[in-house]
Amino acid sequence: KIAFALEAWPENSAAGAALLALFDRVSAPAVRRSILYAAAKAAWPQRAALVLRGLRDDAGGVAGVALQAVAARPEPAAREAVLALFAEALAPQPDLVDAVAALAEPRTSETLSRWALHESNVPLQLKLVGALQKNSDALARAALLKLLQTQTNALTVERTIIAAEELALADAVPTLL
């Protein structure tokens, strides 16, 4: 309840300091998740420290909520920690894909491309297309073109067309015609 109450002061550094101290004192995943939910859109100076601590906590979904916080408001200090989690992932996880997309990190394009081309879960495909679009490097663009050529799911095709249009992928035109 404390975390929920302090969420009302997203600009107040005292609120951030109180939640950081609470995070360090309490090991219960439910409390830590609540603190990270409160920090998701906050502008506290302690937000980076909270997110980093959350990314290192693999108990009870705490790291997942920390990833959601990165997706809600990209945290530059968390970039390498998110990339380390990404490197360990054997399959796409929605919160991880959202965090990587928010960071627009080209170093993830190869894995995102592989996942996007083989993923059958449509909502996850859509997230992967969005992450590739934000990366917008050569690997991501090539994967989007490949998806346009091979994908049969209408929602994924539509989302990929939007990405191709926003990235001005001229190579997509023959496929679309």
Image (tube, helix red, strand yellow):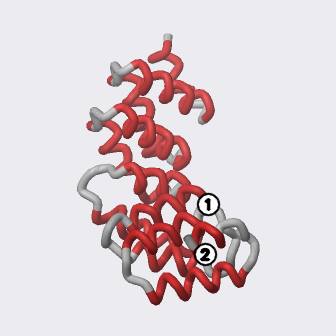
Q: Residue furthest front?
A: 1
Total numbered badges shown on the rendered structure? 2
Compare residues 50 and 101 and report the one nearer the observer. 50
What is the x, y in percent for residue 106? 48, 55
Q: Is residue 150 above or below residue 139?
A: above
Mark 1 touches mark 2? (CB < 8 Å):
yes
Compare residues 52 and 32 and report the one nearer the observer. 32
What is the x, y in percent for residue 66? 47, 66
Callout 1 secondary element: loop
Compare residues 23 and 99 and report the one nearer the observer. 23
- Which amino acid type is shown beneath numbered disc 1? Arg
Q: Earlier in the sequence, mark 1 or mark 2?
A: 2
Question: Badge 1 local density, few (<14 within 10 Å), some, or many (20+)?
Answer: some
Q: Residue furthest right?
A: 11
- Residue picked out by circle 1: 73
Q: Which mark is residue 47?
A: 2
What is the x, y in percent for residue 10? 71, 69
Q: Residue furthest left?
A: 90
Is 174 on the left-hand or right-hand side of 117?
A: right
Q: Residue at x 55, y 70 (%)?
A: 1
What is the x, y in percent for residue 116? 35, 39
Q: CA distance from mark 1 to mark 2?
A: 10 Å
Callout 2 secondary element: helix
Q: Residue at x 35, y 24 (%)?
A: 151
- Which amino acid type is shown beneath numbered disc 2? Arg
Is 75 on the left-hand or right-hand side of 32?
A: right
Q: Residue at x 40, y 69 (%)?
A: 30
Q: Residue furthest top?
A: 177
